[in-house]
Amino acid sequence: MSEHDETPTTNLRKDSGSKNGPPANSTTADGTAKNGGRKGGGPENSGQEETPTTRLRRELPKEVPSLPSQSSGPSEATEEAEEPVLTGRQRLVMGLWPPRFSRAQLIVALLLFGLGFGLAVQVASNSDSDSALRGARQADLVRILDELDDRTQRLEEEKQGLEDQRTELENSSDQAEEARKQTVEKERQLGILAGTVAAQGPGITVTINDTKGAVEADMLLDAIQELRAAGAEAIQVNGVRVVAGTYLTDSGKGISVDGNKITQPYRFKVIGKPQDLEPALNIPGGVVQTLEKEQATVTVERADKIIVDALRAAKRPDYARSSSQ
């Protein structure tokens, strides 16, 4: 190839370099190496001589030295000391106290308190009536049950006697004479109950000595009611016959029975079944224990024959009349 042929090629390379900028690495016709118009070499000027370590150092960011842990200063330590860590229990206490009540909550609380107080009073009143039996011994409970059984048996016997009388009236050949006999017997029985006829029979004697004057009329009335409930048929207190309309009142240092003043010792004569009368007075919380709490002395004695001879005059009713007339 001639010199004229090489010249256009060299010029073409120069023109391309002038348009696109000098090449990173170019070789001239005389074989001299060029590097972007700057002389010298090195790893940054030659892509073939650049190592992976150098490339990694160029890509990684610069290391930032860590600050010491104590560089925060005393201000942060002071803030941590001023704000202590609270436990769950402390948070709960702080949430509940001091209490915050609204007006509606106070009204509801008062209503619930009143309801609970009323229920407590009612339960206490109901339990007081059964406290005597709850504290009783087994022997006392057995005696009370026996007394109830005796009362039931006595009522059954009375019922059977009335039925027998009716049968006799229906089957008797002389019904008029039988009716007369029964009328006389009935009058005698009613006379005993009304206090117009003297009576005698088995029973008990109750003596109450009250040296301090603590026994009142209502205590003696409780004794009379307990004796009647146990089946007493005739009662006499210090020479005064006790009937259905008897009343007792306090009179100075003594007690009045139907307006008749009596003094201690109080002596009861009672006709009835002794096995029923005596236990009725000695039940737990009964008459004897009540009187002994008032420091009175009570003596109960059984007897095969008790005479009740105090009488009451028969009083004609002002308004009541027999329905058979």
Image (cartoon, rainbow, N blue to C red):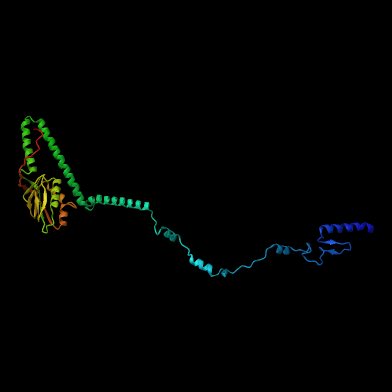
The location of residue 270, given as percent across then percent down, is: 9, 48
Foreground: 141 or 224? 224
Outermost residue, right direction?
A: 2
Residue ID at (86%, 57%): 15
Outermost residue, top direction?
A: 173
Looking at the image, residue 126 lies above or below residue 180:
below
Q: Can residue 268 be seen in this view?
A: no
Q: In which quarter of the image is the C terminus?
A: top left
Foreground: 56 or 258? 258
Residue ID at (52%, 68%): 77
Residue ID at (15%, 41%): 155
Residue ID at (35%, 53%): 106
Q: In this view, does 298 lie to the left or right of 91?
A: left
- To which quarter of the image does residue 296 belong? bottom left
* Callout count: 0
The location of residue 225, given as percent across then percent down, is: 14, 47
The location of residue 75, given as percent across then percent down, is: 53, 68
Q: Can residue 191 be seen in this view?
A: yes
Looking at the image, residue 165 lies above or below residue 303:
above
The location of residue 19, given as percent across then percent down, is: 83, 57
Foreground: 121 or 193? 121
Q: In which quarter of the image is the N terminus?
A: bottom right
Looking at the image, residue 87 lies above or below residue 189:
below
Q: Is residue 48 left or right of residue 250?
A: right
Outermost residue, front direction?
A: 103
- To which quarter of the image does residue 171 belong? top left
